Image (tube, helix red, strand yellow):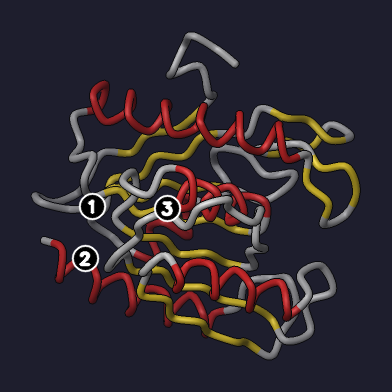
Amino acid sequence: MTNEPLSFAHRFVPAEGPDAPTLLLLHGTGGDENDLLPLGRMLDEQAALLSPRGKVLENGMPRFFRRLAMGVFDQEDLVNRTHELAEFVTASASEYSFDPGRVFAVGFSNGANIAASLLLLHPDLLAGAVLLRAMAPFEPEMSPDLSGSPVYLAAGRSDQMVPPENTERLAELLKAAGAEVTLDWQPGGHGIGRTEIEAARSWLKDVVARTS
């Protein structure tokens, strides 16, 4: 894909306090490296924020990997882009001197999908993840070892883009790999509501305290 690990356009905001985690912010389709910075601060005022922009363009809108149709992913591109993103996170830890063992992904929609792919393909990369409106990215040939990895998975009961059975399948895949999954069903659709932001904030505070 590339030999330049920091070739993603991105924003990095240093941590506001000692021993704070780093939040890897992964936007949805049409977003950019600025989109989730406010959400990152709402989730943790002290955390460092690492926010890359997806390199794939769909009708001019940035994404993290290609899709063939709504809900149908280009599997080869997804895998390649996931490996590339993992390289970026590792290189960024060296470049910005944050603890690579305390990186939590926070992804929305397309960003949540590639975060789920990171969990499945690079199980040692993330300390945990907040997945907002995620789909199962693929069916892994072998279940990775995510023993004890905390994952907050928020889904909308009336989401027209993510079928409930797909969310359930992602939760099953993560649990089968040993992850500690909190599945939070919300009554709304594909957008993020205040209730789940507060729930994710509380969840993240607890898991960060456990890993500090």
Compared with 54, 153 (above or below) is: below
Quarter of the image with the N terminus is: top right
Query: Is label 2 in contact with label 1 (beta carbons under 8 Å)?
Result: yes
The alpha-carbon separation of the residues under discs 2 and 3 comes to: 12 Å
| Residue farthest front in this picture | 142
Q: Which comes before the other along the chain, label 1 or label 3? A: 1
For the residue pair 194 and 166, the one nearer the viewer reads as: 166
**Residue position for label 1:** 21
Tag 1, which secondary structure? Answer: loop
Q: Residues within 10 Å of mark 3 (few under 14, many from 20)?
A: many
- Tell me the residue that label 2 is attached to: 208
Q: Quadrant of the C terminus?
A: bottom left
Q: Nearer the viewer, residue 91 or 136?
A: 136
Q: Is residue 154 above or below residue 101?
A: below
- Residue displayed at 30% across by 48% down: 103
The relative height of residue 6 versus residue 79 in the rendered view (above or below) is above
Give the percent coordinates (x, y) of residue 160. 84, 74
- Mark 2 burial class by Cα count in 10 Å: few <14, some 14-19, many 20+: some
Mark nearest the camera among 1 and 3 is 3
- Which x, y percent locates residue 72? 83, 51
Q: Residue 105 shows which numbered tag?
A: 3
Q: Name the amino acid type tagged 3.
A: Ala
Dot placed on the residue nearer the N-terminal end, 2 or 1: 1
Element on which disc 2 rests: helix
Name the amino acid, label 2: Val
Q: Could you say which is closer to the camera, residue 139 or residue 163?
A: 139
Residue at point 54%, 74% (across, down) = 171
